[in-house]
């Protein structure tokens, strides 16, 4: 009976805070709404595997969306469901963004590590570069050579090859993406040898 009473009081408080905010959305009413729902949102995100810092960031993102879109609420009785729908969407966007992040390597950093770690004549940066280029198709090799050996700018490569600058950037990005596992492995081996 005690838990039921507490739950009813919580629901009444949520309803009153929500009603006040929706009728007069201002900083004071939003502060009460924020204080009421943010702990629930943090718990929602933590229950779905988020670290505390991420859960708090996502909760703030959701509450900002609620503040901005409060006028769009059609049925005030469904405010809580609307709020948690925004939370689910924020979590989906976060995970979607994570899956689109692709590991790439800054070739300038790799070249510096290769020079520092190479002790044999066969491991010169030029030799390493040619070895890496074997993993790429001919168009990517050409763009990478112009960009990183000849030091051409993207617009110069685009003009010389009569292709859009976006295509040049895409080929460089794709080449870096393809090379990332090999260069990371090379970097890890160099670090182990140096230690």
Image (cartoon, rainbow, N blue to C red):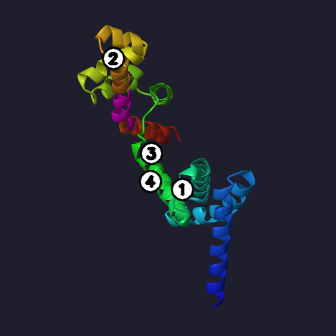
Residue extending furthest toward the right:
28
The answer to whether residue 127 is seen in the rendering is: no
Residue that mark 1 sits on: 73
Q: Residues within 10 Å of mark 3 (few under 14, many from 20)?
A: few
Distance, label 1 to label 2, CA atoms, is 45 Å
Q: Main secondary structure of the magenta part?
A: helix
Task: Say left or right for 148 vs 14.
Answer: left
- The structure residue drawn at horizontal position 50% and vertical position 26%, both measured from the top left corner, is 112
Q: Give the labeled residue for mark 2.
A: 164
Q: Is residue 17 above or below residue 111?
A: below
Q: Secondary structure at mark 4?
A: helix
Of callouts 1 and 3, which one flags the residue occurring earlier in the amino acid sequence? 1
Q: Nearer the viewer, mark 4 or mark 3?
A: 4
Q: Number of marks in the image?
A: 4
Q: Which residues are magenta?
A: 173-180
Residue denoted by label 3: 97
Q: Which residue is mark 4?
A: 92
Q: Nearer the viewer, residue 3 or 91?
A: 3
Instruction: State the separation of the CA atoms marked 1 and 3.
Output: 27 Å
Answer above or below: position of 122 versus 58.
Answer: above
Mark 4 vs 3, N-terminal side: 4
Q: CA distance from mark 1 to mark 4?
A: 21 Å
Residue 182 locus on image (x, y percent) = 36, 37
């Amino acid at each position: 009976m005690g838990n039921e009473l507490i739950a009813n009081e919580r629901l009444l408080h949520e309803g009153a805070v929500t009603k006040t905010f929706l009728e007069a959305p201002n900083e004071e009413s939003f502060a009460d709404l924020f204080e009421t729902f943010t702990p629930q949102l943090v718990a929602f995100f933590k229950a779905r595997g988020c670290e505390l810092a991420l859960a708090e960031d996502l909760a703030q993102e959701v509450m900002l969306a609620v503040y901005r879109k409060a006028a769009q609420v059609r049925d005030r009785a469904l405010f809580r469901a609307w709020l948690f729908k925004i939370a689910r969407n924020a979590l989906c966007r976060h995970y979607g963004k994570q899956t689109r992040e692709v590991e790439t390597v800054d070739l300038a950093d790799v070249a510096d590590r290769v020079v520092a770690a190479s002790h044999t004549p066969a491991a010169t940066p030029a030799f390493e570069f040619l070895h890496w280029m074997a993993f790429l198709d001919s168009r990517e090799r050409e763009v990478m050579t112009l960009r990183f050996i000849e030091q051409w700018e993207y617009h110069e490569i685009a003009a010389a090859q009569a292709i859009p600058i976006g295509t040049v950037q895409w080929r460089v990005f794709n080449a870096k993406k393809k090379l990332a596992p090999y260069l990371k492995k090379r970097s890890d081996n160099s670090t182990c040898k140096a230690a």
